[in-house]
Amino acid sequence: MALAGRELDPGPALQEMLHLLSELLGLNRGRIVLFDETGESGQIRYAYGLTREEIARGRYALNEGITGRVLASGQLVISQNIDNDPHFLGRMVERRLLPEGPVSFIAQPIRVAQRTLGVLACHRIRHRPRPLADDLQILKLLAAHTGQLLQLHAQMRERTESLQQQNRLLSRALDASASRYGIVGNSPRLVQAIAELEQVSDSTASVLLLGESGTGKELFARALHLASPRREAPFIKVNCAAIPETLFESELFGYEKGAFTGAQSLRQGSFEQADGGTLFLDEIGELPLAMQTKLLRALQEGCISRLGGKCEIRIDVRLVAATNRNLEEEVARGAFRQDLYYRLNVIPIRLPSLAQRSGDIPALALHHLNRVNQANQRNVHLTAGAIERLQQYPWPGNIRELGNVIERMVLLCDHPALEAADIERFLPEASLSLPSAADPRGIDAGPEETLSDVRPYVPATSHSPEALYRALQRAGGNKTRAAQLLGLTPRQYSYRWNKLGLSG
């Protein structure tokens, strides 16, 4: 019992228990049989008085021999005379090595919480003066003690493995901190995403980064590239939302000289530029259907053709795609090819929103604060109350919005030490943070309504043609001003205008 209290490993305590069982009580060749990993058979894990060869033979399927019957039923079995019992296998020890005269075999189940863990078994010489009932009572107590030891060890091992896994994740997060990838934070969701990223970094499988706008997809794509064997090769980024539909093919695949008017020289596309490295397609959900087909072909065949070219070019590219759209819904409504979705979704990694990693906000705020202070020769700092207020804000625009707010505070503040009250005027109202498609912000507002300080990213389908047109009318034909009225950037407004086929 003293050994059981000192050792985390139950082995020494159980071995000594079997030793005492034999030497003091005469219950010989004691063994503890436990279920193996499959749960379909058992094997001897601890024994006293048996050779290694005999222990190695101690494997039992359910209902095989006396030991197998106890494993299956969880009930005590006593063989009064092994010579006359057809269920006794005699697999372990040859009969000639046992004492002459009747020999009994007792198999006591080891049970915890109505569950059978194994069997405590031993030989008993029939002419012992001590009553059988006394031996059974001792075996029952020892089996209960064994079960408690085994359960405690299993719980300790599970807890240790959990802590080791957390330590590995934290170590990876620390290794993958700003010094390696530029990713700031150590929240569990972020650590998990980094761990998944590093697990697949050595493969060539396509990776799909999922999450809200502003969660750092480009940073994660670069991190995947830096963690991979392709780190010395090019990393090429393409923002699919910023390319006019007519230029997609030439942007991705390049063109030959004379392929069209103005093509005065050969131009390599993004695939060729990324050859041997990583190609990051941001906002992949904005890719037109016609280009989705060509992209799928390039990924399947590993070769491309330049616009106006007659030969195929073999390329070796690791593709990383990102989107804030639900591509399964896009597939369901026919806006995204199902086969391309499956090709991209080999390894999906979901990036947590800032609200899901609020514990990282202090570190992120200080990171952006140092960056902006250095870039603008300022010395602004945040008090504990200010940082606490930043943690309370929902941040619908995620890290991008946080960075913008920090920059605005540094440039517009009146004094270097900012309290919670000081930063309140720089935080957009939560109710104005995310406009809806049904009621775009600012269109029907009165003249006294003011615009939010931050224009968050919104889906490409967020505004109807009528909303875009009304905004343009209110802005007197100025698209930049119309974009401001809708809470969009000029590029976002123009993209929606052109995609909907509006004229003017």
Image (cartoon, rainbow, N blue to C red):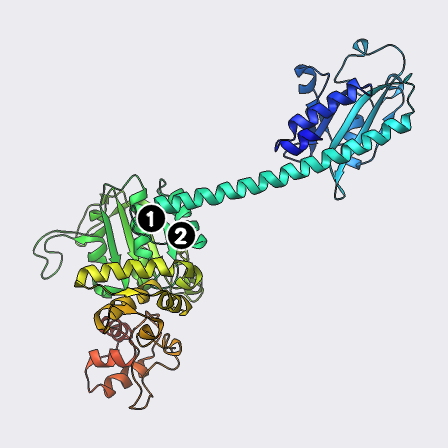
The residue tagged 2 is 186
Residue 446: percent from left, percent from top: 32, 91
Q: Are marks 2 and 1 in contact (CB under 8 Å)?
A: yes
Q: Nearer the viewer, residue 278 or 116?
A: 116
Query: Where does the image place residue 294, in percent across and percent down from the top left?
Result: 29, 55
Helix, strand or loop status at disc 2 = loop
Indicate the quadrant where residue 403 lies: bottom left
Looking at the image, is 286 positioned above or below residue 461? above
Judge whether 97 appears above or below 389 on screen.
Answer: above
**Does 380 sit left or right of 79 as displayed?**
left
Residue occupying image coordinates x 57% and y 43%: 159
Q: Residues within 10 Å of mark 2 (few under 14, many from 20)?
A: many
Q: Residue at the left extreme?
A: 264
Left or right: 384 as drawn, with respect to 110:
left
- The image quarter containing residue 108 is top right
Q: Which mark is residue 302?
A: none
Q: Which residue is mark 1?
A: 177
Tally of numbered discs: 2
User: Residue 286 location, x and y as percent?
Assistant: 31, 64
Q: Is residue 52 above or below residue 76?
A: above
Residue at coordinates 31% horizontally, 78% vertically from top-left? 452
Q: Quick one: 483 or 21, which is closer to the camera?
A: 21
Task: Indicate the quadrant containing the N terminus: top left, top right, bottom left or bottom right.
Answer: top right
Nearest the viewer among 172 and 264 is 172
Any part of residue 64 in sight: no
What type is the residue that disc 2 sits on? Asn
Task: Check disc 1 and give the amino acid type.
Answer: Ser
Q: Position of residue 347 (x, y in %)?
A: 41, 49
Residue 149 falls left or right of residue 378: right
